[in-house]
Image (cartoon, coloured by chain):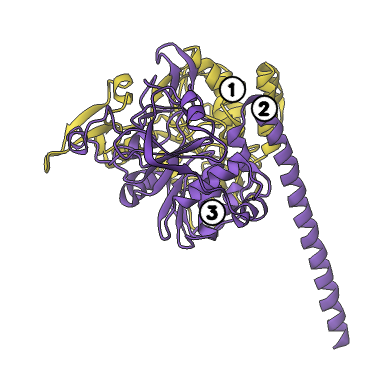
Chain colours: A yellow, B purple
Amino acid sequence: MINKVTTLTEAVKLVREGDTLALGGMTLYRRPVAFVRELIRQGTGDLTLLAFTASFASDLLVGAGLVSRVRSCYFGMEAFGLAPMFTKLATAGEVKVIEETEASIAFGLRATLAGVGFMPGQGWLETDLLKVRPDVRLVDDPYSDRRYVAFPAIKPDVAVIHARLADPYGNAVLGGNLAVDWELTMSSDRVIITAERVVDKLEERADIVGLRVTAVVEAPGGAKPTSCYPDYPLDSAEILRYVETCAGGGFAEYLTEFTNNSD
Amino acid sequence: MTDYTVDELICVCIARQIEDGEVVAQGIATPLVAAGYILAKLTHAPNVAFVSAIGNSICYNWAPLSLSRVEEIWLGRATHILSFAEIAGAVLPTFSPKEFFRPAQVDPYGNFNNIVIGDYQAPRLRLPGCGGIADVTAFSSRIYLYVPRHERRAFVERLDFRSGIGFLSGEGEEERRQRGVTSPGPRYLVSDLGQFDYAHGRMRLISCHPGVSIEEIQAQTGFPLEIAPDLHETPPPTAEEVRLLREEIDPLGIRELETLSGARRRRKLREIIEREQFTILNSQFVRQMRDTVRQSLTGSSKKAH
């Protein structure tokens, strides 16, 4: 096995302008926040952001102006309300939304994993999503008279997953909240694992297999203020501070403080 | 007469729609629904199984609602954990769990919108998105709706965008099936003013909440309401239901967030965070004290030997 341990600075260089960047985790849980901080410092832009559900970390990337297109089934702050910068910029048309749902992302990744161009599903029929996603077509079931939506394959350029534990080869333990991280690591060209701790040998069975992993970075507290269950909970007070700061027009100050933070 | 709030009434209405042994799903940021499901489990439906979007798990257990430690419920107490690709690709299509969705806009036929307000190309407001609503409403036989604030801007004659499937334009089941929609349509809707069904494929008022008139509900609804012949008053929460919600299920009052917005919501959030922090510190203190007492006891018993 190959030792893939590197620094955050080097790992971020694996992201290139114009890439489709997938962020692991769910909403406010186990998001690669330390990675996002370094990405904002380096300023790699024109990204297509793919996040099964998007929240705090994604909102910072959008607000920092690095995201041209968003692919997500939910972009918000859960109980904390709307995601301030996404709501503002998407409403103004300054960031383009490629409409997705749970199934279109899950099936799209599964199509890539199966090596096929699409995966059929029962969703989307008779919704306006088909009107605003003309690239998504219908397919006839060859075995019955039913018709399905052919969710196109999704292949991210880079996926970044924050894990509880990883070994130097990229095998990683997620801690329960699996999101679609296994599917992301298996379908992306480049995969970066940031982990609370990098250990020589995992004592637990891995959720993520290192075979597809490009780089491993130790980043203690790397999901904060989002949670890394069961190591630390969501920092609700910080999420609320972000929402309140943005409500008062203070996003730029928040971003400066966030990127200057050495964590 | 039990004293109760409107969020508690909505939770109770949700709980009463749950049957024992059902599989129930809850989405993102839906504490009224989570509280209602747990209330059902603690009263008439002890065998419900929860499918949680937070944690991607199947869970028979429950814990009080939490803001910061929600994963301790749905992951820490889970019986089975899956990836969300398995939830979307297998669990939802297989179980067709009962789920309460919260539309931003809903039309008379129970179609609904969670994508944008205004014209899609130049919206007045971009919304968070529809999660898996456009997927499951095409096939689910257990679609339920709730609207915490019954206002004309939520109940509209025409949607700005259709991302959740109801009865389309009122077509029958066979015609919908031919168009690929196998769901029989939404069953029920509860708001802060009343309860509704879709007996004829169109929203129909079946009960007014205590103290609310038909006229008041009609005035807050952007289309003419059908009214059930056996219209009645919503049975209010019992003292025990209110006690369970306040003391056991949601002592922090997280359920109230869904009825608030803007600065009032942020104020309530601050209050919840402070109370949650206090509760956690308090329980850590109690645990430490207990451990100290235990250690001193075992220490003294060792000495005795």
Crowding near the residue tagged with mark 2, few <14, some 14–19, many ≥20 C-alpha atoms within 10 Å: many
Spot the residue most to the bottom: B305
Q: Secondary structure at mark 2?
A: helix
**Any mark on residue A61, and which?**
none
Residue ID at (38%, 34%): B227
Q: Secondary structure at mark 1?
A: helix
Residue ID at (45%, 57%): B49
**Any mark on residue B38, and which?**
3
Crowding near the residue tagged with mark 3, few <14, some 14–19, many ≥20 C-alpha atoms within 10 Å: many
Task: Give the CA separation, mark 1 to mark 3.
Answer: 31 Å
- Residue linked to disc 1: A84
User: Do residues under tags 2 and 1 come within 8 Å of each other at their CB atoms?
Assistant: yes
> Is A37 in front, or is B121?
B121
Q: Is residue A173 visible?
A: no
Q: Position of residue A237 (x, y in %)?
A: 71, 36
> Is A65 in front, or is A15?
A65
